[in-house]
Amino acid sequence: MAIADRKAKEKDDLKALILKGAKKLFIDKGVEQTTIRSIAESIDYSVGTVYLHFKDKNAILHSLHTQGFSQLSGDFKVLYNVSDPMERLKALGKVYIQFASDNPDMYDLMFTLKAPMEFLDAINEEEWNEGKATFDVLHTTVKQCMEIGHFTGHKSEPLAFMIWSLVHGMCSLEISKRCTGVNIKDPEHIVTNAYDEFIKLIDKL
Amino acid sequence: MAIADRKAKEKDDLKALILKGAKKLFIDKGVEQTTIRSIAESIDYSVGTVYLHFKDKNAILHSLHTQGFSQLSGDFKVLYNVSDPMERLKALGKVYIQFASDNPDMYDLMFTLKAPMEFLDAINEEEWNEGKATFDVLHTTVKQCMEIGHFTGHKSEPLAFMIWSLVHGMCSLEISKRCTGVNIKDPEHIVTNAYDEFIKLIDKL
DNA sequence: TGGAAAAATGAACAATGTTCATTTACTTTG
DNA sequence: CAAAGTAAATGAACATTGTTCATTTTTCCA
């Protein structure tokens, strides 16, 4: 069945091509400008062809969101070298913030926009594997910190969620432009400065 | 000029009526379902009339966002009784979280959605007065905490932003449905539990 | 009362996601 | 190798959006 194999490959290739076009548009112009028509046009296919490979726009955005998580977990790889869990925890936040700063639209898609979650709902998928895996990296690190005596008296899971919220909140406020216009003295570096305050805080414990 | 006065009043009344209809739709059905047509229909006016009182949809959403901030600062009033700034700080977060939990769509509009900020851009307004005033409540409280000896070695502004990020991040993750599906044991109460960990944390200092 | 000014209307436009009858290309079969 | 069948691709068409603006209706005042 060599022909069927080739056809399957062609199908996968086209799907990847659509995603490639979608990603470029998404990065360059944002979600709203990433229309099905513009995606189709960018790869010289018709609108209908896009729908042969993706159920709807949410499915495309979900695929992009998954690519974003791949990239983020790639970025996390530098942390494997950090043996002290407390140092790793601090560095984890830095990497996370850097990712959000470098890829604001992708971050928005991964952690704020409805599309990826609506896609999961549509296919009756309860679990958000991408988010779960990412949270596990943090949660595991927090647990390791506790094993060597840090964060005594805390519960690892809510504590990890608190730390995630802390960095996510900063990135989210920045991306949704809620930092400028609030009369912060150094809005350019407010996220970094605020994260430094957090590090100061846990260093005091 | 009694007639002109009455006319001005009628104009204001109609503007308020449009906002009332918009708010009901917004609360009941969310942003996407709050279309100009549905707003017009809900108050028995034509589409064009809505545009006589609001430049565009962003202007309507900005007005709703401002109403949300009025409500939030109203909720903050219970804190006036709390004299100890540290206790006030802790309670502030609780009130904030409760507001977000009770009014998720309004919270999204106030702190995440682009519309209100795009409106400010459109009218060349640099400052985000609603956000600024709200942040000031927090920042002032943090400064008062520092005056009585808390948070030594910290800078009030980045620290306040850090705390804002912390509570905003939790609310934001909850509202954008990033908590469920991450295998958190008690997703129902994760926000409250995580905030309790934060309180534990600062109580240790 | 009649004409000007203000207010209100809703048809029309462009852009969007989505569908599906039709066309085109390819594969298999007699 | 030609015909028939299957798979892939097309793009016109539909519903829904925000938005505009020529037209109509209402209100006001001289």
Image (spheres, coloured by chain):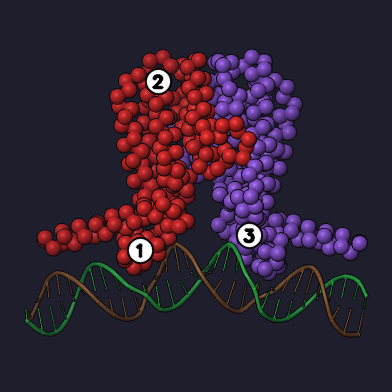
Chain colours: A red, B purple, C brown, D green
Say left or right for A76 vs B22. left
A119 or A53: nearer the eye? A53
Task: State whether residue A6 is above or below residue B200.
Answer: below
Residue B56 numbered mark, or none: 3
Check disc 1 and report its element: helix, strand or loop: helix
Provide residue A43's location: percent of width, then percent of height: 32, 62
Residue C19: which quarter of the image? Answer: bottom left
Specify which label sits upstream in the sequence, 2 or 1.
Answer: 1
In-front residue for pair A113/B127:
B127
Report how far apart the C-alphas of labels 1 and 3 lie in the structure.
Answer: 30 Å
Which residue is at a point 71% across and 29% down the rendered structure image? B79
Assign a secondary structure to mark 2.
helix
Q: Residue at x 62, y 63 (%)?
A: B36
Mark 1 highlights which residue? A40
x, y percent for residue A19: 33, 54
Q: What kind of residue is marked 1?
A: Ala
Quadrant occupied by the N terminus of chain A: bottom left
Q: Quadrant of residue A13?
A: bottom left
The residues bearing labels 3 and 2 have C-alpha atoms spaced at a distance of: 50 Å
Image marks 2 and 1: residues in contact by CB distance under 8 Å? no
Asked if residue B29 is positioned above or below residue A37 in the image, the reply reads above
Report the side of A44 relative to C16 (left or right). Answer: left
Q: How many neighbours does mark 2 have within 10 angstroms: few (below 14), some (14-19), or many (20 or more)?
A: some
Q: What chain does badge 2 belong to?
A: A
Q: Which residue is mark 2?
A: A86
Type of the residue with mark 2: Met
Residue B95 visible (yes or no): no
| Residue drawn at the location 78% of the way across and 58% of the way down | B13
Q: Amino acid at mark 3?
A: Asp
Of labels 3 and 2, the one closer to you = 3
